[in-house]
Amino acid sequence: AFAHWQLDDTYTVEQVAGLLVDMVFDELYVPEFTGAPQPMVLGFLIAGYSGGQRDAEAWLVVIENASARPTPMQAVRGDQSGWLAYAQPEAVSRMLNGSDPALLPKVLAVTDPAHHSNITAAFDGERRSAVVPPMPLADAIHLARFLVDTTIGYSRFLLGPDTVGGPVELAAISRHEGFKWVSRKHYYSAEFNPRGRA
């Protein structure tokens, strides 16, 4: 029934993102949330290497309601490098961009438009680059873990419920080794997993 989901060597990451929409939106989301007064918003970042390509790319799929079939949007082109934070970006943005992501629009809304380019330049000057294209994969893995841990700690110590936390699963995708798990949560404590099975 799902033979069309098999990929050959000419697949693209965009095609995979489209297949995710077929499965998650068409098969699961629409039947569950059609007519729901407050549908659940879901987001997916699909990243990797298209068949035969040298550079990775990423596509974003955001599902907001059952009446609007999402179209994958390219979030990262093959010639780009950097970091992205979704769902709970505030901690990472404050640390690496120098401010909350909502601050610049608020400042621009209450200032003379003649000064907007200078204000935007001042905000841009506070950004810190934590990623460079030749960054070793091990460093990228450590950075990803640090950013997740920072977000967990930030969320934990704010007033209100913890919105980020729990065991963290981490994987890396490289052109030569493909998808590899770096760390996975155990469904039982280590004493019940003496051989380190993931």
Image (cartoon, rainbow, N blue to C red):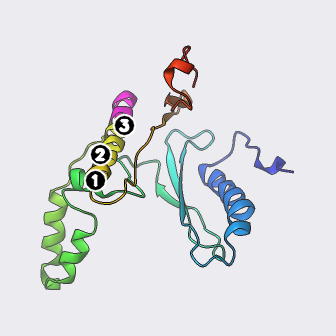
The label shown at residue 48 is none
Q: CA distance from mark 3 to mark 2?
A: 12 Å
The label shown at residue 91 is 1
Residue 5 sits above or below residue 69 on the image: above
Q: Residue 101, located in which quarter of the rendered image?
A: bottom left
Q: CA distance from mark 1 to mark 3?
A: 14 Å
Q: Looking at the magenta stretch, what is its main secondary structure?
A: helix
The label shown at residue 153 is 2
The residue carrying pointer 3 sits among few (fewer than 14), some (14 to 19) or many (20 or more) residues within 10 Å by Cα, namely some
Q: Which residues are magenta?
A: 133-142
Callout 1 secondary element: helix
| Residue beneath the point at 14% across and 71% down | 119
Relative to residue 156, is residue 1 drawn left or right?
Answer: right
| Residue beneath the point at 22% across and 76% down | 106
Callout 2 secondary element: helix
Q: Nearer the viewer, residue 90 or 155?
A: 155
Residue 76 spot, x, y in % from top left: 45, 53
| Residue beneath the point at 33% across and 31% down | 139
Kind of residue at disc 3: Arg
Sooner in the amino-acid sequence: mark 3 or mark 2: 3
Kind of residue at disc 1: Ala
The label shown at residue 145 is 3
Residue 48 spot, x, y in % from top left: 54, 43
Q: Residue 148, located in which quarter of the rendered image?
A: top left
Q: Nearer the viewer, residue 181 or 108?
A: 181
**From this viewpoint, which residue is outermost toward the top?**
195
| Residue beneath the point at 53% across and 33% down | 175
Residue 92 sits above or below residue 54 on the image: below
Q: Nearer the viewer, mark 1 or mark 2?
A: 2
Relative to residue 56, is residue 113 drawn left or right?
Answer: left
